[in-house]
Every structure is written in structure tokens, then in C-alpha cells.
Image (cartoon, helix red, strand yellow):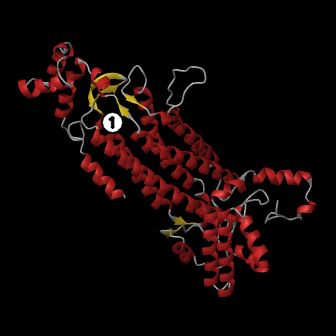
Amino acid sequence: MAQPLWSKTSEKSQTELQKNITDFMSGNDVLLDRELLIYDIQASQAHIEGLERIGVLTCEDTKKIVESLLELTEQFMSGSFELDQRFEDGHSAIEWYLTEQLGELGKKVHTGRSRNDQVSVATRLYCRDALSKLKKQSLVIADCCLELASKHELDVMPGYTHLQRAVVSSWGMWFASFAEAFCDNAHAANDTYHLINSNPLGTAAGYGVNLKLDREYTTQALGFNRMQINPIYAQNSRGKIELQVLGCFKNALLDTRRMAWDLSLFSTAEYNFVQVSDDFSTGSSIMPNKHNPDAVELIRAAYSQLTGAYNELESLLSLPSGYQRDLQNTKGALLRGVTSAQQCLELVPHLLQSLTINSEQCEAAIDASMFATDKAVELVIEDDMPFRDAYRHIKHNYQDLENRLGINSIEQRTSPGACGNLMLPEISERLEDLV
């Protein structure tokens, strides 16, 4: 490992115990920083340009450092520079590279900056991109659901409460429910993006520095909406920001979990309402007859995986004000949670488009009792019967409704949002407003 930036002894003079302690403290931090290095380099460039603006660096010095940072970016992206366990972390790697390339000039990059605000700003940039991707993925899923809701608008299916048959419903309504859910998820991602879009760079270790840093410049250069003003809060928000981001992904995966549960249930032989394509299914190593919706089940399980990352991160934050080394471990929870959630969400539109609806089986599952609510309302309107009397009358007298058709029931259910009035254009308009 290259000598840590904070080291008080040379690498050669370290005892075996000191090396073991350093390895323990670093953990896999440098490997996680592979996800953040590009953001760290971007923020380093803004920091260097800010130092020039207050006279700490000359224009020529800034040009040389920025050119080296761009070279580092190219080498990292091409694989010729590997961020590995030679380095304590990505921050150390950047300074090491600049010092190797530029000598004494490279050592100036950390003026007025701590690794604390360095990791905070890199993480903030990563979180912005993660939320932008979540918004995009949510809109794609919502659009896919809208398309399928229109296609299957009048395809009958049973509606359940308590997992018992309740009323006639439609696949159009089922798909439309998730279209609206993912509009909400896109909206939440957008709102959270603006909430976290503040610049912590320039707060150093949580107490500022004795330099008049041009934080307004770095805020603008990095595309932040505003400066995160208070240095103590900049430190205390570490982990809190990450929780906000994972919370958005949790909301989205809460919906995919329910969707996957429905599909797992409705694709069983006992229901047989829908068939999941072979692409999302596997077989059994011993039972030749099996057609298991494994991918659907893992989409369902993704919520639990993300909740584990969320809870791990949240439990770390029982800390006093100021930086504590515990906060290093927020990074792994964030990156694992975001990566697994993004992988899950990427599959959802493909899953939905691959479904085959078994319309005949859905219609066969409709029985006379599922028209009882419709009939009770009809008695109110047609016979001026109080609803509670109509309810009691129908409760034990719905057998004569067995000749009714499910399609008629859903067409007549015209309250706003119901099967006969899904209001798909309104959901579509909301989706367009979010793009």
C-alpha cells in the first residue's frame, strides 16, 4: 500500500500490527471508491480551479493539474490505471498520481480541503446520478404499464381483498395501478434530487479553513443548486443524505415487490391467470416438469436486500456531531443498495412486456358473488332502496347473478379511476410532466 496521507512513519518502519490495523481501517474502501473516483476527480478539478481564483495557485499551475486529472480520468476509464489496494482510498490515489506526474505541484491539490468534504462531494455527485437514473427507470416502467393498461383495458380478472374473491376487476386496472405508482416514484426521485443538490465542498473536516474559498464557484462548476453552508451540518448530513437516496429506491422496490408477488401468485397452476416467459423462469435440477419464476421471486426479494443496506446505514448514524470513522461504512451500504436496486428496476419493463394473459382462465374465475356489490348499487339507483337494505338483501340472494358477464361489470364501473374509467390520459399527462 502507498503510504497513507496521514502517516507519521514511513511504510518500511511500520510493524506488522500497524499494517494489520491499517488494513482493517481501510477494508475494501479503495475497491468501493472505483464507483466514486470519476466524481472525486470532477470535484478535484473544481477545487483546483477555485484555489486559482483566490490566488493560491497560478493559472499555469491550474492548467497542469487539470490536464493531469483529465489524463487520470482517461487512464482509469481505459483500465490502464487501476484503483487497487496499493492505495488507502481513491482520495490518496488522486494525490499520489498528481505527485507522481507533477512533483511538488501535485502536493498542493489538498490545500483547503479534507478527505471529509472530498468524499462528501463525490458521494453527493454519485447520489445525484443515482436519483436521475431512478427517475428515468421509474418513467420507463410507468410508460410500459400505461401501454399495457391500454392494451388490456377490458381484459377481465378477479379483484381480491384478503386474498378472497371480491369484485370483477381488469388487467387494465392492475397495470394502471403500477403506472401511477411509478409516476409517484419518479416524482419522489426528482424531489429528493433537488433536496440533496447542495455543495459540501469547502467545509473541510467540518469546521471550515482559514482561506476565503470560492465556494460559490465550486457550487456552480459542479452543477449544485446551492451551497451547503454550515460545515458541521455538512459532516452531520453524511449518511443522512444517503438514507434519503436509499429511501427513494426502497419506495420503488416496495412496488416491484408487490408486483412480483402478484405475478408469482397469479402464474401458479391454481390461478393460471398469467404466464411468465421462459426468459424469466428456470427449471429444477431434479423435477423435469418445473417452470419456476425465479427472476420474479428475486425481484420480490430485492426489497429485503435493499432494506438490509438501508438498516445498516441507519444504524451507523447514532453518533455525536462531527466526523467519526464509523461514517466510512456508509459508503458500502449506499453503493450496494443502489446497484442492486438499479439491476432490479432495469428488468421490470422487460418482465411486464413478456407476460401472457390467460383471458379464458381469468373469466372462468368470475363467479356470481363478485357481482353482488354492483347489484346492491343498482337497487339503490333503480329501486330507491337504502344502500344498507340493498346490501342485506343481496348478501344471501346473489345466486341469480351467475349469468352476468364480467366485461359488462367493468364497463359499468365508471367512477374516476375504476375499470370503466381508468383515466389513462390523465396518468399519461402526469408522466409527460415528469419527463
Q: Is residue 223 left or right of residue 367?
A: right
Q: Is residue 205 above or below residue 137?
A: below
- Residue 233 position within the rendered picture, expressed as x and y whole percent measured from the top left: 58, 62
Q: How many marks?
A: 1
- The one nearer the camera, 328 or 153, is 153
Query: Which residue is pictured at 56% across the width and 49% down the height?
Result: 338
Above or below for 393 versus 419 = above
- Residue 89 placed where, x, y %? 73, 60
Residue at position x 45%, y 31% from top?
261
**Residue at the front extreme, as displayed:** 288
Quadrant of the rendering where the N terminus is positioned: bottom right
In the figure, 178 relative to 19: above or below? above
Q: Nearer the viewer, residue 58 or 73?
A: 73
In the foreground, 281 or 324: 281
Residue 112 showing in the rendered view = no
Of the residues shown, which amino acid type is indicated by label 1? Trp
Indicate whether 141 appears above or below 233. Answer: above
The picture quadrant where one finds residue 98 is bottom right
| Residue 416 on image: x %, y % | 21, 41
Dot 1 corresponds to which residue?
Answer: 174
Rendering quarter of residue 393: top left
Residue 67 left/right relative to 428: right
Q: Is residue 119 left or right of residue 362?
A: right
Q: Position of residue 264 (x, y in %)?
A: 45, 29
At 52% from the left and 39% from the top, the residue drawn is 303
Query: Is disc 1 placed on a helix, strand or loop?
Result: helix
